[in-house]
Amino acid sequence: MKLTKSTKYATLVISILTASLLNEYIVNVINSYYKERTYLSVLIGMLVTVLVFVPMFGLVRNFMDKASKSYIKASKKVAKKSSSGLLIGFLIAFAVLFVFFAKIRHNIDVLANIAAIIK
């Protein structure tokens, strides 16, 4: 696969995961105010999803693409070879997003678990 195509896929994946994480966090904060599971809370969650994803893939997409591309470009510079730099940068971003997803979606503290294993 060409490097430019790989870069586009990497930035797309990072952008989608970031938007999903932001959406999950906002929905969790809103749901903390609504203890009861009601249709209203479902509608609010749906509204938040639309309010997060529409700008993300519209107006904010340009910003995320630039931020993701500059991150990946920097990781390519750190590694001497562009393709390995892209892979390393993507894996680091993916790992960071994994830690946040585990905490927000499943209330798993990955860093505490790693620290416990190391000790």
Image (cartoon, rainbow, N blue to C red):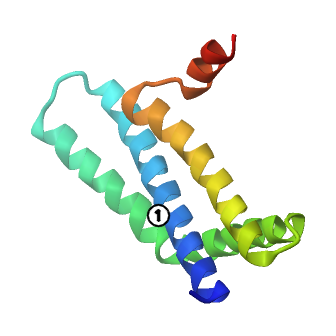
Horizontal side, residue 94 vs residue 104: left or right:
right
Mark 1 crowd level (few <14, some 14–19, many ≥20, 10 Å Cα): some
Name the foreground residue: 55 vs 91: 91
Give residue 37's quadrant in the image.
top left
Identity, as a three-letter code, of the amino acid under mark 1:
Ile
Q: Residue at x 55, y 62 (%)?
A: 14
Where is residue 9 shown, x and y percent of the image? 53, 76
Does 13 appear above or below 18? below
- Placement of the C terminus among the 4 image quadrants: top right
Q: Label 1: state its secondary structure.
A: helix
Q: Residue at x 48, y 30 (%)?
A: 103
Horizontal side, residue 84 vs residue 104: left or right:
right
Residue located farthest toward the left when viewing the structure as drawn: 39
Does 116 appear above or below 49? above
Where is residue 23 shown, x and y percent of the image? 41, 50
Name the foreground residue: 28 vs 104: 104
Does 34 appear above or below 42? above
Name the foreground residue: 1 vs 14: 1
Q: Residue at x 56, y 86 (%)?
A: 1
* Residue designated by label 1: 16
Give residue 114's quadrant in the image.
top right
Where is residue 33 shown, x and y percent of the image? 33, 26
Horizontal side, residue 85 vs residue 49: left or right:
right
Where is residue 71 shown, x and y percent of the image? 75, 65
